[in-house]
């Protein structure tokens, strides 16, 4: 079946613009995670959902970052008034229910955001 | 808080040579441990994972890793490297059970020379 997909794959934004990044998880996966990967670094956790509930948003770097998953499937990460330090690859991952495969996170290809 | 250290930023090996990538973690209990590989422009692919039981785990693409509690380590090994193994490798830890966020190391970039 299809894996996790993300769109757009590349996004260039002028500083101050708002952007929206989309994640389509694997069908049936209840958990969805967003990570930020700066150049030369490992992914860092931003937020995660179980179905439509946002269970943890402690990794969001500022109130300019907002994520939603209204129907428990597709998720959108929105960044308002983008700054240069927001330039990174944003990775989405999804997981099946824990009873099936604990901690099996399947990653999408990421969206590379460049803020100029 | 959990943390993961990958001491080597960049490693270069010859094709056919053996490989060991180091990973140390900090966590109070036995964590869930993972190795992921990331090729340029690609997402992360799970190579292997350790939850419990046998401390030597086998993964895909001929990789294996050994969990050593006394050293808080989970090193990745491969007996014979192929040019296609050139990529970035990330060690990660997850606390407890259930689906919780992963904590990643900064990664080790592997270059393979002929």
Image: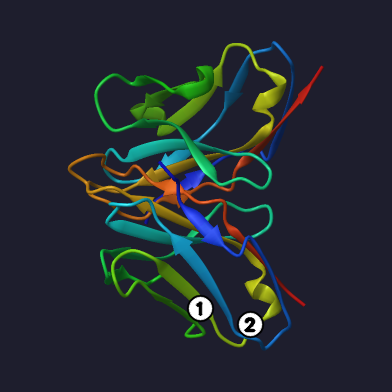
Q: Which residue is mark 1?
A: A78
Do we see residue B76 in this rendering? yes
- The x, y position of residue B88, in whole percent, is 63, 39
Q: Give the answer, above or below, for where A22 lies relative to B48.
A: below
Q: Residue at x 65, y 17 (%)?
A: B81
Residue at the left extreme?
A99
Q: How many marks?
A: 2
Q: Quadrant of residue B56?
A: top left
In front here: A1 or A99? A1
Q: Residue at x 24, y 23 (%)?
A: B53
Q: Is residue B22 left or right of residue B2?
A: right
Q: Quadrant of residue A1?
A: top left
Scheme of image coloration:
rainbow
- The x, y position of residue A62, in whole percent, is 50, 81
Q: Residue at x 82, y 16 (%)?
A: B114
Q: Give the answer, above or below, for where A59 lies relative to B8.
A: below
- Chain label for disc 2: A
Q: Quadrant of residue A110?
A: bottom right
Residue at the front extreme?
A1
In front here: A5 or A87? A5
In front here: A57 or B54? A57
Do we see residue A60 in this rendering? no
- Chain label for disc 1: A
Q: Secondary structure at mark 2?
A: loop
Q: Which mark is residue A82?
A: 2
Q: Give the answer, above or below, for where A97 lies relative to B34.
A: below
- The x, y position of residue B97, in whole percent, is 22, 46
Q: Secondary structure at mark 1?
A: strand
Q: Which mark is residue A36?
A: none
Q: Give the answer, above or below, for where A81 lies relative to A67.
A: below
């Amino acid at each position: 079946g299809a894996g996790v997909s993300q769109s757009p794959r590349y996004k260039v934004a002028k500083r101050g613009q708002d952007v929206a990044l989309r994640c389509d998880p694997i069908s049936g996966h209840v958990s969805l995670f967003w990570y930020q990967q700066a150049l030369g670094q490992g992914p860092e956790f931003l937020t995660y959902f179980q179905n439509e509930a946002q269970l943890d948003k402690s990794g969001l770097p500022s109130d300019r970052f907002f994520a939603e998953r209204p129907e428990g499937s597709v998720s959108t990460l929105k960044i308002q008034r983008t700054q240069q330090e927001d330039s990174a690859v944003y990775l989405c991952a999804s997981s099946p229910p824990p009873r099936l495969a604990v901690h099996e996170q399947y990653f999408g290809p990421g969206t590379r955001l460049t803020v100029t | 808080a959990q943390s993961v250290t990958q001491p080597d930023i960049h490693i270069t090996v010859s094709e056919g040579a053996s490989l060991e990538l180091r990973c140390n973690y900090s966590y109070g209990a036995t964590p869930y441990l993972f190795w992921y590989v990331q090729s340029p422009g690609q997402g992360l692919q799970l190579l292997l994972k350790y939850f419990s039981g046998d401390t030597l785990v086998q993964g895909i693409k001929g990789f294996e890793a050994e969990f050593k509690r006394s050293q808080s380590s989970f090193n990745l090994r491969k007996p014979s490297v192929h040019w296609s193994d050139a990529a970035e490798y990330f060690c990660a830890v997850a606390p407890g059970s259930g689906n919780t966020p992963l904590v990643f190391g900064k990664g080790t970039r592997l270059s393979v020379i002929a």
